[in-house]
Structure formats: C-alpha cells, structure tokens
Image (cartoon, grey):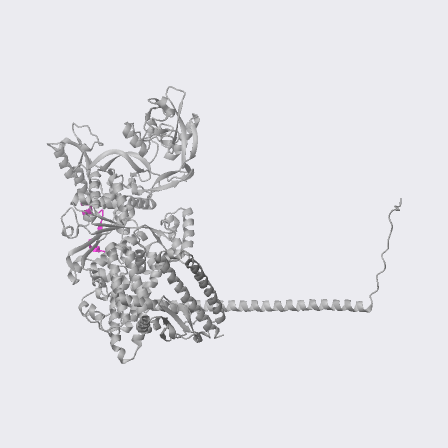
C-alpha cells in the first residue's frame, strides 16, 4: 500500500556561474597548483640539502676514518720502528759479560723508557758480585755501621706454588725496608727460603703420579713416594725464586733454606724432643678437622667456609649427585617405656647412627617428665640417656632437644667431655660408614648414608621433614672436600704458658705490632688458646721423632703417652727407652716403632727465624743476626704463624725472634673482591711486569683445575676487567704501585690502571734525568756542601732545595713509622709535581741564556739540578731498584763517591735543615696559584696553546708588587706568557680583563690580545650572569647584617661577614670593569 504521508521533493537545478565567479574559481585553482608546486620545490630543495648534508657527513666520516687509519698506521709504524730500535739496543746490552755493569756499547741510555731494557742485566750484576750479602756490604760500603744489624726473614712461600700479588706486595715492602736500611749503613740481611708445604706438595705429586702411572702413593710405598716428591721439588720447585729475582728482591741467595733440608730437619727434631721432655707435648685422642679425601687432620687455616642462607643442593667430592645442605632435618626418638617421642633437629642427620645422648634444658617445662629417662635408638636399638645440659641446649631454640654425637661435632664433643659420654666413631678414614653404623649402612659414603638414614626413618614413621637453616660448612682448602670432625689420637702441644709470655711481650712493649689495631686480635687468640694439634697423617713432611715402645711384662697401649719415647734416630730412641724403663738389656724391648705421622707444616715454620741461622747449633750467623729485626707478613696469619714463632722463639732461645711485626693488608681486585681463580681476578706478578693479552689471560684459566662453569664466570670477569689485557708495566712500577696502595687500616682494592699510571711516572723520571744529562754534559760535580748550594743562587733553586728537604724528611718519617704510602706520595710529588712540572721548566730559560752575566747562576743551577736528580734517584731506589740503578750509573759522581759500585750502597739522603725555607716556599706557592690562574684564563678565552700573549698580575699592595715582580720570569715561563708584568690596582688599564687568583692577586689579559680567538658577546653574557649571582649573595649577606639586633651577633661572626662583604664588592667591581672593557671592544 502506498504511504501517502510521505511526499517526494526534487532538487532545484544548479545555478549557472557568472563570468566573475568562474574567473575567481580558476584563479583559486591556479593558486593551489602554484602552492603545490612551491611545496614540491621546497621539499626537493630540502631533500637536496639533506642529501648534500648526508654526503658531507659521509665524506667527513670517511675523512675521519682515513685520518684515524692513517694515524693508526703511523702509530703502528712508529711502534714498529721503536721495537726495532729497542731490539737493536737490547742486542748490544745483552752482550754485557756476566757480573759486569751494563755495557751500553757507547750508545747511552735508550731515548725512551722501556722496562724490558732497563730491567735487564742489573740483577745478574748484583748477584754475581754478592752485593746482597752483609759480608760484601761490610767490605765495600764506606759508611757501614758494623754494630748495627737489620735482619728480616722471608715468610717462606709454599714450594708448590707461584707468587700472586699478595706475595708481591709483601716482597715489595720487605725489599724496600732492606734496601733503605742498607743505604743507611745498617748491615742488612734478608734471608730467603721456601716451605715444604706438606699437604699441598703431597697432593700435587699424588695427582702427578696418578696421571702418569695410574698408581697411588700406597701402591709405590712411603720411601719411593718421598723420593718422588724430592725429585719433583728439585725439578719444579724453583719457580718462586725466579719470580723473586724478577721482582728485584735483594735476598742473600747464598743463605737460602728449605724447611725440609737437613739443618731445618735437625731443628724440628730438637724442638719436638725438648718439648716432649719438658712435658709440653703429649699424645691424646681428641676431635680434629679431618679431610676424608686427604685422609689427614688439617689445621684451622686450611679450612675454608661456605656460607649458606637456605636450603641448597651441593656436589661433594668423591660422591655422585647433589645433597641437601642449609637445612635442619627433624626426626623423632621414642622415649623408653612410654608412647611419647622427643623431636630433635640436626644439620647432620646421618650422624644419628653414632648418637650417645639427647640433651634438654633443665628449665624447659615441656620435658620435665623426661629427666633421667632414656630413648631407644630406632635404627640400632641402642639405649641412649636423656641428659640435662644448659650449655648445649639454648632455651626456646628449635625443638628444645639436641642429639649429641661427641665423636663428630665440636659442641657435642665438649658436652661429651662434661657428661662423660661414650664417643662412637662412625666413619673410616676415607669417610665411609664403619661397622658402628650397622649392616644396612656400613660401607656407604657419608652423604649417601644421609639419604639412606632419612629413608630408614621414613619407613618407621619417625622422619618429620626439613626446613631452611642458615649455616656454615667447613671445606678443605686443598681437596674441597667437606670437613669431618673426627676423634683421632694425635700429638698436642700445650700452649697456654708460652701464649701468656707472648701476650706479656706485647703488653710490655717489647714486641710491637703494626697496625696496633691487630693487638686486640693477638690478645683474643692467645688468651683463649687451646692445645695445638701438630700431627698430620701424611708421608711428606718432618716425620715425628716419637717411638712407641713395647716392653716385656707391660701391657702395650699406643694411646698412653708414657709408653712413648723420643729420639733423633732409632738408636737414640732405643737408648732413651732403656733409660726410661731402667732396662738392663735391649732384648727386654719387644718392639719400638716410629710414629708414621708427620708434623704440621706450621711447626717447622714456627722455628724459621732462628732455624735459618743454623739453630740448634750456635753458628756465627745465629750470634750475628738473631734476633731478627722485623717480621713483615699478611694479617691473616697473625696467629697461625706469627704467634707460634714468638712462642717457640721465646721457649727455645729465650729471646723474641723479632721486635716488630708489620702486617700488610689483603690485596683485592678493583671491585673489592677477594682474588679467586674462579672469578678470573688472580694476577701473576709476571703478567703485570711483562704485560699480557686478554686472550692469554683467558687461556691461563684452562691450564688450572677450574670447573667449566667456573671457567665461564672467570672468562666474563677477565673480559670486563681487562678488555685490552694488561699493558707492560715493569717491575719498578708494580712495586711502587703496591707500596703506594698500602694503608694500615684497610684492604687494598688494586686497580691495574693505577699500576699503568706509575709506568708513566717511570717515564717522567726517565725523561727528567735525560734532560738533566743533556744540561750537565761535561759537568763535574763538586764535593757535597749543603751550605754552598744555598749561596749566590736564585729563588727557584732555593725552592727546589726546600722541596728536596721536605721530601727527604717525609720519606725518613714514613720508613720509621712503616707508612709506605707517605713515602711513595712524597717521592711522587717531589719528582712529578716539583722537579718535572716546575723546576725543570723554570731552568730552561736559564740554560738557554747566552748572556755572560747569567753564567754564574747557570753553574749554580747545574749544581742544584744534579743534586736534586741524585737525591731523587736515591729516594726511589728502595721501591724502584732497576730504574734507579740504570740512571744512577749514567749521572756524574762527586769525588767522594767514586767508590760506589751500585746505588744500593749509596747513602740514603739525610735531612738537611739549612735547605728548609718556609719563606720561599710560601712565595712560590702564591706564584704557582697565579700560574694556575693564568693557564685557566687562557682556556677560558680560548687562547691556542702555541700562541703567546702577555699576562698581567694586578695587586693591591707594594709588598705583593715587589714579591711578584721578583718572580715574574718564573711565572712567565710556566704560564706560557709572552711577558708578565705586575701592576698596582690603581695603574691597571680599563681594557684589561681577568679573574681573581687569590686574595692578594688578580690575573689579567689585555682584551685586545684576545680579539682573534674569543666571542666577546658571549663572555659579556657569562660575566653578567656571574655578576648577578655575586650580587644575590651580597644581598643575602646584607639582609643578615641589617637585622635590628645585629650588634648582639658574636664579634667573630661580624668580622667574617665584613670580610665576605668586602670580597663580594671587590669581585663585583672586577666583573663590572671586565664587562665595560669588553663592551668597548664590540
């Protein structure tokens, strides 16, 4: 049906446009087209411009790349030519006959500093002529003091190892001490030696035999095994000596000892026999640190600790798979005659097989009903007492019940001693469960037994689970095996009496420990000392000179000390046994057997300060050089070695083995981490000396025994810390850097870049001495006269002598207080900041002068320059033996010092009070402030380095005018000025602009000299901003001054405010003047 409600409409026809409208429409269309064309043209222009810019940028980039490559090629060529010249130079000097001074072949020292060239020949020269021996020193050195001895013994490094940077630090300090004292005329002796390192050496040789022959030491027998160890020692044990020689250490190698040589072995036997006879050594069965992998007891220092925060799965050497650590295992013990249980928690659930008690606290109300009762062991049926022990059980901790295994836990052992509990040994020496563990567990490895015990308890419904537990695990440092506390018969030294005497020595000031902070550790350890376990179940070491004697008619008991005798040999032991038992015939002895164990390595090390001189024989060396003077070592062995040397020295010789102990800090990496092979941050001193690539550092990781996962981590560490490897630094730079790092209160975070910077310092010393040699050509030094050097001279010479006097005093004070950082800082400042940066630069105009009137001061300057170079070389010698010797041998000598064959015998510089000149030092300090200000002003105004312009010093008083005028030539030279004039404030032209150098002086340039190099408009803007800033500070100060009660403000504060206000006004006046001056030039 049609919808009539809708209507249809039709659109009207479009109107026709008139001509005018058509014209406008056409124009509009054309305008749009024009606009479009214009945009397209602009876009094209922009594209073309951008393209041109890109092409220009690419061209510039290519140009820079070409220049870089050209520069790189030029540098490589330069280095190649340098290496060729160096090789030619080395070819000449290496022809020097052994034992003679370095023969330069008439070519002089090498133009540039190269450690390889400098450090060759000299050690052979020193060694061949015996200069390290006190005998040669007393024969040659004219100022030697025969009655003053200075002796140190080297802390003997392990014969198995190689030196790391911690050893290098100790060696550097010890050699600095010995060279300093030798130069001072004290008869100096540094005794070298190595330690037989019982466990470490035996492990190395056992691995070698297994690798080569697939045999254990037991397969070849004790005698043949010990012979193989000696063969290994003779073949491979000299690496350390080579490193020490490379480091320039002035050890008397003719006195070198080894802790297992005949004389030292005699000393060890003598000590043990004396201690045994005096009742200080006895045999008893106690708890020890047992290494199942090595099958020996080990000392506390050979135990490392792994800290666990929570449950952690760990691999265990000798086991398969991973095991649970960082947890408390909980299980239940059934109480005898009841249906009740005692829940106990333990970190060592496998040792429950050897439990002999369960302890509770007497105050724990939960367990009152269990007092005096027993539990029944669920796995072996043993009846175990419930005991009260408030020392062992902490109220409120854990379940409140503690399983007690006296044979395998230190705390439980003490409890067992207090409560007289049975001590059941659960393990074999190899760490397997023995017969005491029961048939089900016998023969299992320790941590396999852990899992099996849990399984057995689960079967009986007694296992309650495990929870996270923060704990420390003791690990053998040699085998990485987990330490097992074990009950073993061992030899013990009673230490309390000796420890008391060692404490008294420190308290009475007879023995000095530096830093003093370590005295607290000394007292803490020695005042709570326990008996020292000295026996080790090894084959390599000093076999204990004790013999068990079985006599007819007496029950044999090897655990009874009274059935043992001592002797220097079997025959001597038999004689002692006959005397001990009042026997009439040897036939009454059924058997006599020497203990197969050896002594703890620290036992022989404790005798080192006097055994090196032949003790117990009363040798000439012992009479002449013992006691020694200083013991320098690491703080980590203060108790393990230092305390034992003191105790044994006092006991055996009735003397302290040394009067001073200096403890150096631990060397860490740049991030403060302890150096570890697994982190890839352990550095061989030779790698620092010679340089090494990153790739070579990584390759060395594969030569060790790191796990693949550790190698990956260590590789990443090397890539991060040594992306370019390590540059060749040389021995001198390394030694100086290590000593410069020493601080008596903190560990050393060694950044290798700092060592490299001291390599550059060596270069400065080299170039400074070469400069001096050029200026001193033909010069013959006069006999030394401190007074004559200060007469008829100029200010800069006086200033340099004052600097020398200050450096000498600081060095002497530093050596006296063992502050090696002070000494190295003083030396560094003397050479670099004073001699090189100031003095040498200032002498250049003097030496260049052709004026006849300057000849007298030129000669005086030569004398001063020579004196200061000579002093500088002697100051650095204790730390930098090679460069100091090389340069000392080429500078002229005074008539009275022609006898000196080596700088190590030259007198160390002594304090010269007449050189101290506080007045000239203060004046030169002000002049250097002005020089610095002028240099800064040149940078501010973009003055090119090669451009010389005049500088001006504006002062306020006639006194400063005269002072700066007197030193204007000095200021001119070091500030690179065309000329330097001093002006009073009232005489300063308005066109001069500058900055305040100090309260007494402002440095200025004539603004006309700056037109070509500087944007004055920009500088005006900067100065106006600075003026506004100063004005704001002035207004803030005025607000404080203008308060109503300002008169009540303390006079000192008012005085300070007045000074500040004056300073602000002066600065504003200067800024306004500079702005006006610059405006006049625009």
On the question of residue 964 being in view, the answer is yes
Work out whether 111 lies above or below 478.
Answer: below
Residue 234 spot, x, y in % from top left? 25, 50
The image quarter containing residue 420 is top left
Where does the magenta region start and end? Answer: 251-266
> In the image as oriented, which residue stretches furthest toward the left?
584
On the question of residue 445 being in view, the answer is no
Q: Is residue 396 left or right of residue 607?
A: right
Residue 450 part of the magenta segment = no
> In the image as oriented, which residue stretches furthest toward the top?
337
Please state which of residues 68 and 715 is positioned toward the viewer in this rendering.
Answer: 68
> In the image as oriented, which residue stretches furthest toward the bottom?
852
Residue 922 spot, x, y in % from top left? 30, 66
Work out whether 953 lies above or below 238.
Answer: below
Q: Is residue 960 left or right of residue 1?
A: left
Residue 204 spot, x, y in % from top left? 31, 46
Q: Is residue 498 left or right of residue 943?
A: left
Q: Quadrant of the N terminus?
A: top right
């Amino acid at each position: 049906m049609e919808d009539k409600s809708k209507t249809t409409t039709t659109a009207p026809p479009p109107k026709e446009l008139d001509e005018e409208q058509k014209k406008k429409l056409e124009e509009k269309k054309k305008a749009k087209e024009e606009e479009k064309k214009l945009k397209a043209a602009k876009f094209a222009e922009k594209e073309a411009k951008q393209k041109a810019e890109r092409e220009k940028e690419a061209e510039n980039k290519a140009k820079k790349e070409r220049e870089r490559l050209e520069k790189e090629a030029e540098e490589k060529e330069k280095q190649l030519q340098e290496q060729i010249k160096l090789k030619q130079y080395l070819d000449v000097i290496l022809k020097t006959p052994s034992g003679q001074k370095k023969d330069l072949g008439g070519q002089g020292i090498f133009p540039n500093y190269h450690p390889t060239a400098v450090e060759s020949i000299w050690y052979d020269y020193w060694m061949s002529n015996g200069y390290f021996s006190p005998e040669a020193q007393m024969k040659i050195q004219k100022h030697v003091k025969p009655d003053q001895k200075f002796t140190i013994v080297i802390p003997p490094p392990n014969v198995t190892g190689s030196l790391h940077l911690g050893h290098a630090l100790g060696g550097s300090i010890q050699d600095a001490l010995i060279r300093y004292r030798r130069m001072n005329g004290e008869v100096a002796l540094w005794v070298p030696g190595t330690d037989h390192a019982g466990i470490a050496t035996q492990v190395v040789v056992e691995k070698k035999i297994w690798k080569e022959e697939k045999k254990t030491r037991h397969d070849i027998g004790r005698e043949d095994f010990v012979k193989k160890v000696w063969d290994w020692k003779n073949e491979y044990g000299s690496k350390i000596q080579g490193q020490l020689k490379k480091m320039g250490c002035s050890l008397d190698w003719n006195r070198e000892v080894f802790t297992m040589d005949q004389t030292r072995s005699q000393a060890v036997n003598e000590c043990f026999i004396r201690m045994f006879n005096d009742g200080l050594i006895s045999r008893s069965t106690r708890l020890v640190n047992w290494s199942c992998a090595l099958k020996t007891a080990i000392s506390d220092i050979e135990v490392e600790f792994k800290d666990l925060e929570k449950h952690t799965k760990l691999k265990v050497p000798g086991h398969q798979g991973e095991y649970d650590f960082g947890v408390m295992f909980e299980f239940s013990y059934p109480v005898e005659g009841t249906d009740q249980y005692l829940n106990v928690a333990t970190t060592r659930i496998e040792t429950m097989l050897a439990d002999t008690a369960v302890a509770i606290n007497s105050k724990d109300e939960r367990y009152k009903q269990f007092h005096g009762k027993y539990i029944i062991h669920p796995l072996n049926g043993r009846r175990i007492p419930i005991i009260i022990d408030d020392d062992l059980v902490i109220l409120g901790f854990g379940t409140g019940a503690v399983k007690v295994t006296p044979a395998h836990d230190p705390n439980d052992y003490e409890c067992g001693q207090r409560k007289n509990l049975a001590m059941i040994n659960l393990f074999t020496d190899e760490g397997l469960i023995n017969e005491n563990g029961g048939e089900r567990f016998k023969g299992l490895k320790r941590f396999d037994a852990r899992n099996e015990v849990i399984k057995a308890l689960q079967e009986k419904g007694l296992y309650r689970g495990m929870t996270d537990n923060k704990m420390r695990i003791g690990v053998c440092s040699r085998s990485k095996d987990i330490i097992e506390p074990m009950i073993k018969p061992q030899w013990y030294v009673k230490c309390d009496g000796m420890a008391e005497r060692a404490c008294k020595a420190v308290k009475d000031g007879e023995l000095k420990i530096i830093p003093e902070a370590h005295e607290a550790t000394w007292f803490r350890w020695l005042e709570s000392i326990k008996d020292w376990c000295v026996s080790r179940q090894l084959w390599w070491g000093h076999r204990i000179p004790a013999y068990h004697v079985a006599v007819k008619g007496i029950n044999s008991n090897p655990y009874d000390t009274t059935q043992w005798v001592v002797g220097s040999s079997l025959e001597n032991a038999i004689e002692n046994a006959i005397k001990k038992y009042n026997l009439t015939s040897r036939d009454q002895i059924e058997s006599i057997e020497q203990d197969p164990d050896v002594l703890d390595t620290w036992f022989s090390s404790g005798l080192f300060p006097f055994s090196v001189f032949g003790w117990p024989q009363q040798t000439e060396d012992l009479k002449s050089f013992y006691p020694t003077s200083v013991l320098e070592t690491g703080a980590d062995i203060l108790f393990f070695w230092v305390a034992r040397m003191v105790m044994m020295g006092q006991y055996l010789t009735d003397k302290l083995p040394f009067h001073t102990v200096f403890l150096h800090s631990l060397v860490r990496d740049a991030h403060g981490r302890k150096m570890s092979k697994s982190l890839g941050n352990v550095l061989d001193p030779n790698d620092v000396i010679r340089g090494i690539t990153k790739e070579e550092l990584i390759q060395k990781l594969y030569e060790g025994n790191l796990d693949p996962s550790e190698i990956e981590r260590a590789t990443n560490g090397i890539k991060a810390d040594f992306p370019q490897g390590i540059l060749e630094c040389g021995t001198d730079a390394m030694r100086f850097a290590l000593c410069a790092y020493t601080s008596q209160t903190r560990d050393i975070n060694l950044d290798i870049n700092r060592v490299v910077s001291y390599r550059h310092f060596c270069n400065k010393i080299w170039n400074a001495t070469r400069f001096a040699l050029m200026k001193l050509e033909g010069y013959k030094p006069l006999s030394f006269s401190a007074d004559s050097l200060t007469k008829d001279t100029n200010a800069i010479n006086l200033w340099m002598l004052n600097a020398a006097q200050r450096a000498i005093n600081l060095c002497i004070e530093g050596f006296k207080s063992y502050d090696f950082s002070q000494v190295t800082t003083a030396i560094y400042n003397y050479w670099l900041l004073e001699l090189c940066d100031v003095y040498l630069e200032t002498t250049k105009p003097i030496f260049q002068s052709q004026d006849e009137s300057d000849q007298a001061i030129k000669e005086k300057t030569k004398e001063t320059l020579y004196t200061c170079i000579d002093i500088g070389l002697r100051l650095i010698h204790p730390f930098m033996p090679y460069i100091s010797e090389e340069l000392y041998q080429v500078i002229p000598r005074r008539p009275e010092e022609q006898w000196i064959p080596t700088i190590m015998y030259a007198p160390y510089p002594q304090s010269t009070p007449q050189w101290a000149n506080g007045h000239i030092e203060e004046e030169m300090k002000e002049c250097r402030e002005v020089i610095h200000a002028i240099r800064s002003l040149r940078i501010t105004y973009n003055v090119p380095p090669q451009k010389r312009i005049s500088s001006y010093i504006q002062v306020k008083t006639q006194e400063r005018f005269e002072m700066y005028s007197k030193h204007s030539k000095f200021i001119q030279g070091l500030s690179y000025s065309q000329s330097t004039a001093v002006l009073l404030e009232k005489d300063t032209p308005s066109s001069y602009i500058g900055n305040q150098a100090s309260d007494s002086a402002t440095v200025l340039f004539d603004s006309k000299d700056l037109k070509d190099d500087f944007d004055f408009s920009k500088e005006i803007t900067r100065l106006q901003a600075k003026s506004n800033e100063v004005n704001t500070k002035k207004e803030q100060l005025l607000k404080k001054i203008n308060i109503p009660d300002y008169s009540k403000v303390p006079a000192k504060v008012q005085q300070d405010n007045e000074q500040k206000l004056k300073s602000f006004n002066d600065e504003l006046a200067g800024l306004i003047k500079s702005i006006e001056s610059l405006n006049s030039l625009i």
